[in-house]
Amino acid sequence: MPSGRAGLQADKYRSNLDLYTFFIKFVISSLFYTEWFDYKICLFHPEKSSLMNNKNQSPPQLVRSVSRWQVVGLSINDVIGSGVYLLPAAAALLLGPLSIWAVLLAGIAVALLILCFAEASSYFDEPGGAYLYTREAFGDFAGFQVGWMTWLARVTSVASLSVGFALALGYLWPGATEGWGRTLVIASSLGILTWINVLGVKEGAKMAVFLTITKSLPLLIFIGVGIFFINKDLLVGEVPPLTFDSLSEAVLLLLFAYCGFENTPGAAGEFKNPQRDIPFALLTMVAIVTLIYTLVQWVAVGTLADLAYSDSPLAESAAEFAGPALAVVMTLGAMISIFGNVGNSTLVGPRYLYALAQDGFGHRILAQVHSRYRTPAVAIVVQSGIALALALSGSFVELAMLSIIARLATYAGTVAALPVLRKKFGHRKKAFRLPGGNIIPLIALGLCLIFLLSASIGNLIAGILALMVGAVIFYLRSPKKDP
């Protein structure tokens, strides 16, 4: 029997494993109104189960129930996260007062990538996003690799953000940061969001809109009040020395501040009018987010003298000009932002699993649609189960290394696919074309190259390993084609 510290670690592992097992069984058994043996039949012998499809009926399909402004809410909720509460300090440390202009320019640069996604999304009304675009342009292998990397980024994000939520909650309840308290917070928050998204995409979208409004209010209050307390001398302060390393770090920092927009097309199969609504949502989102980020950076730089060395820049800045009450509001805003990001990834991420499984690159049960809720219920539960295991074990830390390359695969794949998609689908009725021919896609590809050059060796190695694993999965799971 283990003793001492080893015994405690073993007990902790067994406790987490028991909770993880209970979570999976409870959610799936509740989901299908069945006992444990029916749950096993559904997972391993779906063709024998009455829980999914009735052989005498056509298989249930995803339902289009998400409106245009709900898509906008989803898009904003995907981008505005906990990062905006830390960005001002990190950007100021690297760039000083120039960080205000850097945030604005980063928004304009990312808008070029978003324009490419907007045009690509106007050609399709199916789920899958970047996976779908690259598959249609370059074939199954390229499409699968992009879909695989995109999903890896999603499940890793859910795991890391769930841990971040527990840490943020520790400000109000210290017990949330360790032991059973931490496990309970991570499991319960994931369980709630999983259940909401299983109940229906409309419920998930409504939650996203609510969280978008709730997380934006503290930022708008911060801007609206702080703008009257700006010290102009702080806006023209000393700029730190700029080196290749610092600029590379700044590029990646600012890129990740605007990340998340690539998720919006993932659930296109459940949007009412995706070919029109996704481009509208993406362009509306980047305008709103760029404005908010730039104004937040302006107020933070202009109100907090030691901004670059702050651990909680917005909370400390708010306390400086409005007292502790607004500081608490900003802390709550950070928690809501994290929760909102987890919710969106729980909604969109499983749609990649669903799309991949539909094409034969995963177990067919992942492509099943729940007969009552009309959602890819098993895919949602499976992703949440994997994310929970990663969060409780801490394994997401290693996987997070590939996040940069995973996102770049998504961006570069879509941008490179755009000229091909124009030739194949440019005639479609709801499609629109960006002005300037291939100028915008070429500039966007250049941005992807800059981001790639800014990545560390560790990021590159992790990305290459993930692509190699993806290649193995592709050849093992690739559906056999008729000669």
Image (tube, rainbow, N blue to C red):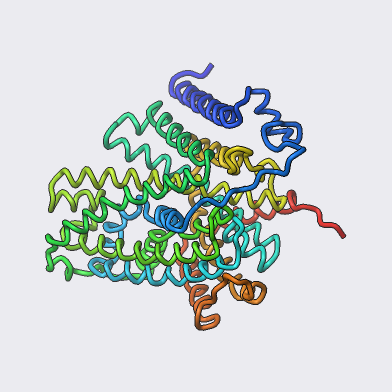
Please tell me which residue lies in front, 375 or 390: 375
Q: Is residue 101 left or right of residue 257?
A: left
Which residue lies at the image location 64% right of the left edge and 47% below the top edge? 61
Which residue lies at the image location 58% right of the left edge and 61% below the top edge? 130
Q: Is residue 406 left or right of residue 359?
A: left
Q: Is residue 439 above or below residue 230?
A: below
- For the N terminus, the quadrant is top right
Can you give x and y, in whole percent of width and height, for residue 7 in the image? 48, 21
Can you give x and y, in whole percent of width and height, for residue 418 in the image? 58, 72
Q: Is residue 350 left or right of residue 76?
A: right
Can you give x and y, in whole percent of width and height, for residue 125 in the image? 60, 60
Q: Is residue 37 above or below residue 332?
A: above
Please tell me which residue lies in front, 241 or 156: 156
Which residue lies at the image location 70% right of the left edge and 43% below the top edge? 59
**Visible in this render: residue 343?**
yes
Please tell me which residue lies in front, 290 or 98: 290
Which residue lies at the image location 32% right of the left edge and 29% below the top edge? 175
Can you give x and y, in whole percent of width and height, for residue 416 in the image? 58, 71
- Which residue, as the protein is rendered here, is positioned at the far front? 57
Q: How many marks?
A: 0
- For the C terminus, the quadrant is bottom right
